[in-house]
Each structure stands twice: as structure tokens, then as C-alpha cells.
Image (tube, grey):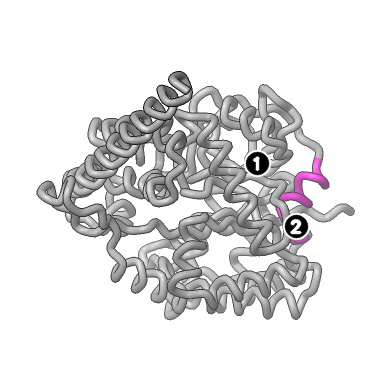
Amino acid sequence: MEKRTLCLYFQVHQPIRLRKYHFFDIGKYSDYYDDFANRSFTKKIAERCYLPANRVLLELIKKYGKNFKVAFSITGLAIEQFRKYAPEVIDSFKALAGTGCVEFLAETYSHSLACLVDETEFKHQVKRHADLMKELFGMKPVTFRNTELVYSDEIGEMVAKMGYTTMLTEGARHILGWKSPNYLYTNSINPKLKLLLKNFRLSDDIAFRFSDRQWDQWPLTAEKYVSWLDAADGEIVNLFMDYETFGEHQNAETGIFDFLAALPGQVFSASDFEFLTPKEAAAKHQPVAPLHVPYPISWADEERDLTAWLGNELQNEAFEELYKVRDKVNALKDESLTHDYNCLQASDHFYYMCTKLFADGDIHRYFTPYDTPYEAFINYMNVLSDFILRVEREYKEKKSKTNKETKKIVKG
């Protein structure tokens, strides 16, 4: 009897955080980043999550060999900060890469939502990220994971045109209807692109509910969890989550590392699953149907849509203003401006401006460094205003210089 597939994927991302930037700083200072916060956050999460979790995974690979496999995507902005503040994190990921049991996925360099507004910018960021993965880990990504699992038929087609054959997204109820996320699907426009769908219930049992003492299934043991996996329908269960689940969102005292360490052994002894990477899972299984997703979905909040980032006027105004200058930034090819533009595109900045409350309010409050969404908007727009001034000034100077040189050639 053929084994079913268990696919473990972890997202690694840290935004480059902005400092408190006042209205009166605009046009005077272009120092946008809170270096102290970025250093302390990176070092803290490295010690609490990345390093201990990578040690657990390395031990599991040593113990089970090629039978245990995982996948990661690591944003360019996270890599920049690891290089600066915690190079040992990159070394620990390289050690995992060297085992041959880890797949590194492509995504947007800046953890951006460029796919919604600019295909050229989107492709540029994906290529830059893929090149970085090749440079660091010696492997060219073949599987794509978009920022926050954002996906639609149109986005999938863009990804397929870039040469990717597999993409991850959310198994959203309103898209699937009666269908199960536990099968392989295809893009409805280009069937060459295979889709792996997150099983959000089983993923969120670990990512969000693990330490919740009010949960009727607390405490969650590896034995109990594997019994749920075994009872799941379908051919493949995709467990997709933030890597910060381990040690940061669920701290070590909850037993989350012990759970991770015990999981593979329990899977092997008490289920009919085998661990595969996304690339291997897509190669093994036959797609059952195309998935129709006319409007973008994501893995955020109960709605599984874009409202966490683009659900109010503040977010939409900031997003529109940011992308108005993209052509000028690209034309200037200025290293400093390009870096700032990458940092400002991180979806986190728009997430901090979210005014949604009710069911998802606590999650939003946990992730934001600001007291209110309005404070997040004002601070971001102050930074963006200064950035736009710099772009316009440089663009004007470049245009003026080009015009002078053209006149000289004509006269000559």
C-alpha cells in the first residue's frame, strides 16, 4: 500500500523595522531604521527560535536520515539581518541544506505584495530571491511560495511563466467548498503549475492552539496529533506555518520543541505517512482537479483574503503611494534608494495599519510594534514622504544631466 504524504514547510521572515520618524524629519534626515530594535529582535528570535529549532531538525535528520524532510522559505530581508546581527543562523541553515533533506523555496525578496500591482517588480524580486538561495544554499528553487501564501489564478499564471512547477497556497474553505485540501491541484489557467494547499486546521493546531489551556484538546501530544493526521482524508497533508511558532510564538516552556522532536518517530510508528518536500510531493501525486481562485486568497485571518493588508483607506493610500514611484526607482538604479524601496515594500508595514478587531484583533496586536494602526500609518507615511522626495530629486538631477549630455552631442 502506497504511503500518504506529510509535507512540512516553515516561513522565515523578519521585517526591517522603522524608527520613530517625525513629520519634521522629512527632507532633513533619511535615517529610517530602528537599528537597536532590529538587532535585538533578530538576536532574541535567533536564540529562542531559529538556532534551537534548527538543532532539533538537524538531530532528527541525523536520526532518521532521508526519511525526514522539511522545507523553508527565508526572505531576503531576514537574510540581510542574519548577516548583520546573527550570522550563526545562516550557518545553521547551511548545515541543514548540506543534509540533502531540506528544500528551500523561492518567494519575494522583500516579503512584498508586488504581485498585486506590478508583474515586472514581482518577477524582479522573485529572481533576486532565487539567486540568493542559490548563492547561500547551492540550490536553485523550483517551488514557489508567495508572501503570506497570497494566490489567485492570475498570480499562479505569472509564477508558472517564471518557470516554477509547484506553488504553495491556502486551503481556504470558501475556495474549496466541499473539496479537501489534502490532494494536489493545478492552476486553472496554466495546468503545468501544481498547487499544494495548506491544511489550516492541522497547521493551526500547532501554530496557534498548542499552548492554549482553554482549548479542549490541550495538552497536545505527538501521539494525539498523529492520530488526527491518520484520521485525515486524502493523499497529502500540508502543514505550513511560521517558523517562529517554535520558541517565539509558542515558547520553549510550552513543550513545543519536545513536540517537534517526538513528531517524526510517532508518524513512523503509528501512521501510514512519509515525509516529503514540496518538490517531491508534487512529483509523487497526480492532480485531482484545477483550483479556481478568481480573487486573491491568503493564509491570514478568518477571511483568508487580503483585508489584513489592504482592507482600509489607510492601507490602500500607503500602498498606492509606494508603488507610484516604482518606475523612477528602477530607472535610477541607485543602491541606497533600491534598498530602502525593498524595505518599504514589506507587507508587515501595511499589516500594522490594520483596523480589524473581533476574532483576529489579538493576533494583530501581538505582531505590531505600534500602539494604534493610525500611528503605524503616520510613521510609515512620514518615511515614505521623505523617500519620495529623495527619488524625485535624484530623478530630476539625472534627467537634467541626460538633457545636458544630449545637447552636447547634438552641438558636437
- Residue 202 in the magenta stretch? The answer is no
Residue found farthest to the front: 412
Mark 2 sits on what residue?
276
Q: Is residue 360 above or below residue 261?
A: above
Q: Is residue 325 left or right of residue 56?
A: left
Mark 1 sits on what residue?
A: 167
Residue sitting at the far right: 1
The magenta segment: 273-285
72 with respect to 283 (left or right)? left
Q: Is residue 405 above or below residue 204?
A: above
- Rate crowding at label 1 as few (under 14), some (14 to 19) or many (20 or more) other CA atoms within 10 Å: many
Closer to the camera, 282 or 378? 378
Q: Secondary structure at mark 1?
A: strand
In the image, is residue 312 above or below residue 204?
above
Q: Residue at x 33, y 57 (%)?
A: 367
Residue 283 in percent (x, y) is at 81, 45
Q: Left or right: 387 with respect to 28?
A: right
